[in-house]
Image (spheres, helix red, strand yellow):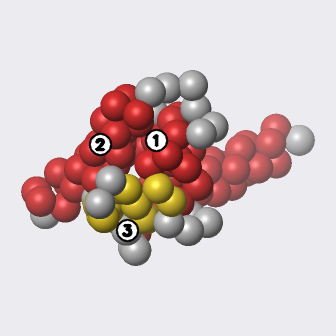
């Protein structure tokens, strides 16, 4: 369980940055070289590589170097842990809100 928590923490930390979220979104369309990933951003390649390393540490992205070209790809199933965590919390809050709504409806009925 602790290992899962650590991976989940790394994934959420990696996704906390808008540049990294944009990189993940781009990689959803397919693999891309670092140069291709850098085009929409006004940052240097060293900075982009730091973002890619954070995404790799979070288990979201993998990269492979062939000669001078580094190609990045989305790691299949990388977001499943985060998705599971979010769905569990959404279900809890939806249940709580349903109970609150029922309670308020009873109170409103009692007042009228």
Q: Position of residue 79 (x, y in %)?
A: 41, 63
Alpha carbon of mark 3 to alpha carbon of mark 1: how far? 14 Å
* Residue 6, visible in the rendered structure: yes
Is 15 on the left-hand or right-hand side of 25? Answer: left
Is 94 on the left-hand or right-hand side of 20? Answer: right
Position of the C terminus, as image quadrant, is top right
Query: Front-most of 15 and 43?
Result: 43
Other-residue count near label 3 (Cα within 10 Å), few / some / many at <14 / 14–19 / ≥20: some
Query: Front-most of 28 and 2?
Result: 28
Give the residue pinned by disc 3. Answer: 75
Other-residue count near label 1 (Cα within 10 Å), few / some / many at <14 / 14–19 / ≥20: some
Position of the N terminus, as image quadrant, is bottom left
Q: Secondary structure at mark 3?
A: loop
Give the residue pinned by disc 2. Answer: 54
Query: Front-most of 16 and 44?
Result: 44
Mark 3 or 1 closer to N-term? 1
Q: Residue at x 41, y 34 (%)?
A: 45
Q: Residue at x 49, y 26 (%)?
A: 43
Tell me, for residue 20, which label it has, or none: 1
């Amino acid at each position: 369980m602790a290992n899962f928590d650590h991976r989940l923490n790394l994934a959420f930390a990696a996704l906390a940055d808008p540049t990294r979220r944009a990189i993940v979104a781009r990689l959803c369309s397919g693999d891309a070289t670092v140069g291709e990933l850098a085009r929409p951003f006004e940052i240097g390649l060293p900075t982009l590589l730091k973002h890619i390393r954070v995404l790799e540490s979070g288990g979201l992205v993998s990269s492979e170097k062939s000669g001078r070209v580094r190609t990045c790809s989305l790691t299949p199933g990388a977001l499943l842990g985060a998705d599971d965590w979010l769905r569990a919390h959404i279900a809890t809050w939806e249940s709580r809100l349903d109970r609150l709504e029922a309670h308020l409806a009873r109170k409103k009925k009692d007042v009228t």
